[in-house]
């Protein structure tokens, strides 16, 4: 932070000490800022005497002080200036606060604006409401200390840092009239996710998208030390931002009046530039990527708070990060500091006799949906319209007989998604509401059909040799899973739809972001005024079983395990075994709301099992017996062979095929699972099977061999309360692999047909005696497999050319 | 990539077309580069006829082509120039290749240097060895397609992208004589982790640390499209790099001779600057952060490969990313292209009659450990020395009686770590080998005692009001979990020791990095020449149960679940219940090798249970009956009350305390688990209890109430094969929480004493009849708790002041 109170700005031609604002505007800005700062401090410290109409007594203060003051006055300062430009320009603006731990700020603003009392009628704009506002903050049964789903006007939880800018861009896409003001804290700016998200400007179309106005807020300190960006030389910082494609304008200082003049001047300049960029692009056409403006705001951490307490610096120091001093209840000296601090905002000038904000304060509040706390963009469910989907059945591949033809499932899905996109493109922004996201993998994941109707978003130079790039492209590709996820979250949270395809192993990069989104969804389910948003849909392909070429580092099916730790109401996991089932599942996911849908499906040509009708039934049930692969017709089976995932399904079928050749009288029931949550109890998950339903499929006492896509123990976790659990034997990925052949990947993890067939023989009592020869034969084939692949470098023809029921007729 | 063959460099004063290298140096560079390129193409395509001594026939080519050509010639080019400067300056240099999917390159280099044949004697430097080298690549039973643990000279798996620079810095810390050349691909440069790791230069001490020389390799394309950094204007790129504190020198072009001259000149300039920076800092003292040099290398993707195939551009295009053309076996035309391509390197000039590299090629290979493929830094276990640890017993807190005094566990640990640091500081670099890492949380995690003996690493300006910053500080804090993790991994992989403290919820940010490190460890366990490295030690604190103040977004105990999916041999999870046990566990972890150790422990003042002796026994056993809390002395218990984690342990004890008051004849066995893996079977995990051992603690038929720190199903997963599993009832985090009180966090997830006591009453048959009154009382206290916290904003005194056995005597 600036060590001087002098206010400065980068542009040399303007004298910043020159007043910019008319006195009445300055007065309104000051009043609004004082009011929100007062209300912020009140939330952190007070539970009584909200208007300070009597001297502050111990019982007026909270016994347990929680909250973050340091960033809050800065958030309020910026919002005051947003309000000013919203009013003057009739702007549609929303506010993304990276330093969302400054929760008291936006809550204060929403209360001053009136929004808070509209959505929470028990917190009215009067003295009682103010007391409630103060008491509830960070209080049991009250509201969280951070910006949270409970905070009107927010799409951005103030928890984990790093995603403010990508959320802001997600909100701006396809909202040509929207300006998203996005505060980036200097702590957050050190995170990887934030550092690369500066590049989002290379993917924003000035014609069809809105604008993002970043405010890099350098208040100098993290929890216990200085921040990197606040301490590097200013010329380095500006070079870094320019190098990321931005034009930075700096506003620095601590004197409130001077800072208001400088900030107002700078906001005007930035919004003029934004308007100019947009109008040029929209009237004269695009002319390369524009250099968008941004603001660097240097202001003291804990600005307007106590300068020092107990001889230690507070304002402009990391000590103001959270609660600047504690013990206001039992320490009279501290309480005096608190009272002086609160009175320094002159609350008697800000609130009327009833405790409502006076006209001078309210003058800076925009009206209706122009209030940033009330913008429908921040409650995207209000704006969400269902996608117009083509009929997925029209894209189905022909499956004349199960397991005897092949197709690449994701390529088939790509054709469906292409037409989802095409239908969406029939609308003009801001009605366009569908994008796909991938970290450099759209084509690798075989979704290139989408590029027949749109391009990859790209604002940089395009060469003759390039293919599929377009400034208004809707395939969002940057080699940053974080940025893809952040864009998509921002897009969904503002009422739109999306689809994220990713290599299965590397989706773990966004594990923590998924946690936050799942928590957001869970909480919004409990908030009446929040409307449901579209689900976050993942297609995980290039999955563990077909990363034989990239090797061990690319083999990890654990994202499923990660997701199922979240609340059952918000997570769904699908493992469609073939193309038609994938289509049905994808269609369902694109129609759903408030979920995180994880679809795992392979991209390689694979056997197809279910025709259109069978796929629809199977996907709808989520689990089912495949009668054509079973030999237990009408009788209790000897064994249940279950599977989930395309490769484990193929291997289980091949095992069933082998077994019925050897043991024609074996009563084998073949069960396939698409919707993994069907395995759980209906008491644990809304999709769960009842115990009776589960038992009717898996029996209560017969051996079950379960060939599973991921880590085997997840199946145990999902079924451990089932009657037959002790008989369930699961095969799955046991963290073995390298660069090898596809079938060898199955073999080293024991999910291959030979191991599975041996498992069945071992576990069915009446096969144990007669199965010795078969087991020897299976073992011999495993040995033959090793020998063949190590000599020829590819899988033996027997497994490569497998079709259900042996040779093609 | 440059669209012209003209070679350019940023510095205007030098005419780059002017030759720089003497002819014999140029010749050696050319020969070494041609040799490694030839050997790289051979690995991707050939399995016979390695020296092309006969025309290329179908059977000489592999049936299944896997590998990445695009980046490989660039990696080889850079390594050639590294060799030149190593030889000329007798440098200690290592090589970190971000684009590690270019696996054939470093394998080729290691073979030319002789290292490969030294560590793999079955791949000698002759024709048979070359055939083996080619065949084994990406071949079943052979080696992975990427740079991997199998690759001599590497500490950096070529899998997930983003960690090259932070690994390189980790390697350079405390290695004052080492220069780490680090290639950053332009795909990788788009990731968040990489984008922020440019700032690592703010944490590198020119006096005690070595240097990192980044080479940003812009070959222009990712898998299927252009890269951002290769297409933005050069002045933006340079501004971005300067803004990140680097001085970039650009080498661009495609004509090999011109590029060799330019690269040699630039390498010399960079190494001169590095030497100058170091010598000034080391003789005249530090003078602010130096501006370290780096190289921007623009060269065609797939450089020296075919210009086009089937009319489509290959060189300088994304089509050269992987195998540039397939079907060399069955397509005669493609095979002709391949043969011409291979012959363009003139192998007959590069390898002698036996197939060994000729003297002209070998001239560029450094000797012995100066070879980058043979540097001991890249096989850190060779250099690893055990830490000199103080006796942890000297730091123990006094525990006169279990559960009747309090301490903050991590603050106690901080004192131990302080003295670990102090002992390490008695040594001079490069023998110094211990650092601690935290994303802005060292003090928040209560480890500030460490700052008594060292500072936070910081090369920027220091203000009067700052505390604890030092240019040679060994507390590594940047608000980027990725960078902390990457630094630490690089530090460990080069033979040193470290300790990472982090908020429990946000360690998920590095989930995917942990996957990669676990895979690295698992694989190196299987490679004879790789020596064991120090374990990666995590302290997860500010854990789920004490994130009552930050709220729901900060509450996630799922990292444990993530880690236990990895191979059992490489993961350990510890949940010490108190300070002394934490000390013993930490001591053990700091001595261990080849593990990922996850320690979860709270930072708040909490009851202490075990004195020095008891803690040692308990931590060593990892699980045990606490007799002082049990009432089943000498008899079979009615119930087992088990727990793991500090807060669940306190609540379980408080429940036991309540129960023995009400039911003096209840035979309750109290079991505490420190080492979570003890719960698993000894067939699944090396730390697992035998079935007999497990049964002796948990019985085979009595109810078990298990109060657990994390998601409850993990306990089921670990115990589902145990005899008594069906009687195990687990309480844990069920994804409920907000900003509230600590005790309320327990209540809403049902791990609190009242719920646990009710669980016991419900499940012990002989209590069901007599327990009605107690259950009513417990329920009343739950209601009272809600009422009290919602009125007073803090926990009721009864739970705040809890001590084992009621009031202090």
Image (cartoon, coloured by chain):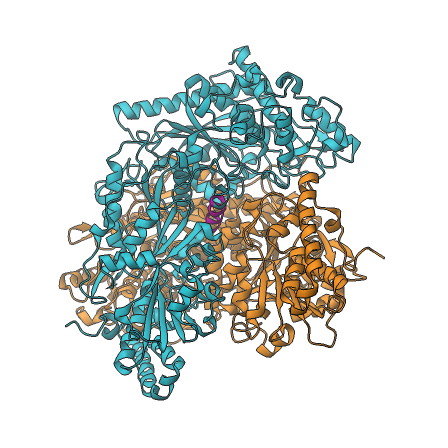
Chain colours: A cyan, B orange
Residue toward you, A689 or B104: A689
Q: Residue at x 42, y 32 (%)?
A: A377
Q: Quadrant of residue B553 in the image? A: top right
Which quadrant would the N terminus of chain A be assigned to in this image?
top right
Say above or below: B107 vs A513.
Answer: below
Say above or below: B119 vs A106.
Answer: below
**Res. B84 visible in picture:** no
Q: Position of residue B563 (x, y in %)?
A: 51, 61
In magenta segment, residue A514: yes
Q: Quadrant of residue A61 in the image? A: top right
Q: Residue at x 51, y 66 (%)?
A: B717
**Res. A136 visible in picture:** yes
In magenta segment, residue B716: no
Q: Is residue A2 left or right of residue A560?
A: right
Q: Is residue A89 left or right of residue B688?
A: left
Q: Is residue B93 left or right of residue A330?
A: left
Residue toward you, A403 or A17: A403
Q: Which residues are magenta?
A: A511-521
Q: Position of residue A746 (x, y in %)?
A: 35, 70
Which quadrant would the C terminus of chain A be assigned to in this image?
bottom left
Q: Position of residue A424 (x, y in %)?
A: 27, 38
Instruction: Kindly report the secondary structure that dominates the magenta region of the rendered protein.
Output: helix
Say above or below: B350 vs B206.
Answer: below
Q: Residue at x 36, y 35 (%)?
A: A173
């Amino acid at each position: 932070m600036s060590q001087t109170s002098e206010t400065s700005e980068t542009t040399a031609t303007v004298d910043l000490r020159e007043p910019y604002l008319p006195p009445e505007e300055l007065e309104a800005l000051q009043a609004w800022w004082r009011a929100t700062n007062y209300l912020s401090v009140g939330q952190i410290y007070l539970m009584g005497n909200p208007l300070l109409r009597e001297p502050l007594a111990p019982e007026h203060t909270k016994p347990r002080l929680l909250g973050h003051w340091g960033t809050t006055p800065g958030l309020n300062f910026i919002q005051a200036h947003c309000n000013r430009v919203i009013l003057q320009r009739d702007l549609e603006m929303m506010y993304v606060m990276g330093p969302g731990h400054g929760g008291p700020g936006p809550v204060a603003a929403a209360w001053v604006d009136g929004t808070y009392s509209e959505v929470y009628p028990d917190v009215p704009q009067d003295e009682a409401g103010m007391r409630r506002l103060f008491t509830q903050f960070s209080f049991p049964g009250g509201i969280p200390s951070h910006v949270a789903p409970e905070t009107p006007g927010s799409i951005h939880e103030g928890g984990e840092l790093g995603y403010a800018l990508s959320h802001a861009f997600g909100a701006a896409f396809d909202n040509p009239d929207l300006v998203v003001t996005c505060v980036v804290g200097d702590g957050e700016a050190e995170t990887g996710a934030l550092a690369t998200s500066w590049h989002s400007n290379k993917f924003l179309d000035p014609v069809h998208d809105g604008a993002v106005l970043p405010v890099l807020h350098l208040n100098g300190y993290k929890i216990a030390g200085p921040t990197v960006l606040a301490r590097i030389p200013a010329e380095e910082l500006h070079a870094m931002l320019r190098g990321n494609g931005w034009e930075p304008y700096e506003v620095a200082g601590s004197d409130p009046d001077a800072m208001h003049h400088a900030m107002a001047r700078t906001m005007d300049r930035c919004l003029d530039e934004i308007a100019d960029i947009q109008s040029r692009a929209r009237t004269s056409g695009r002319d390369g990527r524009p250099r968008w403006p941004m603001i660097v705001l240097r202001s003291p951490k804990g600005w307007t708070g106590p300068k020092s307490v107990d001889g230690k610096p507070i304002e402009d120091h990391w000590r103001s990060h959270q609660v600047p001093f504690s013990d206001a209840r039992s320490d009279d000296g501290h309480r005096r500091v608190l009272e002086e601090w609160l009175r320094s905002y002159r609350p008697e000038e800000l609130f009327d006799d009833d405790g409502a904000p006076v006209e001078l304060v309210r003058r800076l509040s925009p009206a209706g949906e122009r209030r940033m706390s009330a913008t429908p963009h921040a409650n995207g469910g209000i704006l969400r319209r269902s996608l117009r989907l083509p009929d997925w059945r029209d894209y189905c591949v022909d499956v004349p007989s199960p397991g005897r033809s092949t197709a690449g499932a994701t390529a088939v899905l790509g054709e469906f998604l292409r037409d989802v996109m095409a239908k969406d493109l029939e609308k003009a922004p801001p009605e366009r509401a569908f994008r796909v996201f991938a970290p450099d993998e759209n084509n690798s994941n075989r979704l290139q059909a989408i590029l027949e109707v749109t391009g990859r978003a790209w604002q940089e130079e395009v060469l003759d040799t390039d293919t599929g790039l377009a400034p208004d492209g809707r395939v969002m590709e940057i080699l940053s899973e974080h940025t893809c996820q952040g864009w998509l979250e921002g897009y969904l949270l503002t009422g739109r739809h999306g689809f994220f395809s990713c290599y299965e192993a590397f989706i773990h990069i966004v594990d923590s972001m998924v946690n936050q989104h799942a928590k957001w969804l869970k909480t919004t389910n409990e908030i009446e005024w929040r409307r449901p948003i579209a689900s976050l849909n993942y297609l995980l392909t290039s999955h563990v079983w077909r990363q034989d070429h990239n090797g061990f580092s690319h083999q990890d099916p654990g994202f499923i395990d990660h997701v199922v730790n979240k609340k059952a109401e918000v997570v769904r996991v699908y493992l469609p075994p073939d193309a038609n089932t994938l289509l049905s599942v994808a269609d369902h996911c694109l129609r759903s709301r408030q979920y995180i849908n994880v679809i795992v499906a392979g991209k390689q040509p694979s056997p197809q099992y279910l025709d259109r009708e069978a796929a629809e039934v199977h996907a709808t049930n989520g689990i089912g017996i495949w009668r054509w692969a079973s030999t237990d017709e009408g009788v209790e089976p000897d064994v249940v062979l279950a599977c989930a995932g395309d490769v484990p399904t193929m291997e289980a079928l091949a095992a069933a095929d082998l077994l019925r050749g050897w043991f024609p009288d074996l009563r084998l029931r073949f069960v396939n699972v698409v919707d993994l949550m069907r395995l759980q109890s209906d008491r644990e998950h809304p999709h769960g099977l009842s115990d009776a339903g589960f038992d009717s499929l898996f029996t209560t006492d017969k051996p079950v061999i379960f060939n599973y896509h991921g880590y085997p123990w997840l199946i145990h976790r999902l079924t451990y309360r089932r009657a037959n659990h002790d008989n369930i034997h699961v095969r799955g990925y046991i963290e073995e692999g390298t660069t090898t052949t596809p079938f060898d990947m199955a073999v080293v993890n024991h999910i291959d047909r030979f191991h599975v067939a041996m498992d069945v023989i071992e576990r069915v009592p009446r096969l144990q005696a007669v199965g010795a020869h078969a087991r020897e034969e299976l073992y011999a084939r495993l040995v033959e497999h090793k020998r063949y692949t190590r000599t020829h470098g590819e899988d033996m023809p027997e497994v490569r050319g497998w079709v259900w029921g042996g040779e093609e007729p």
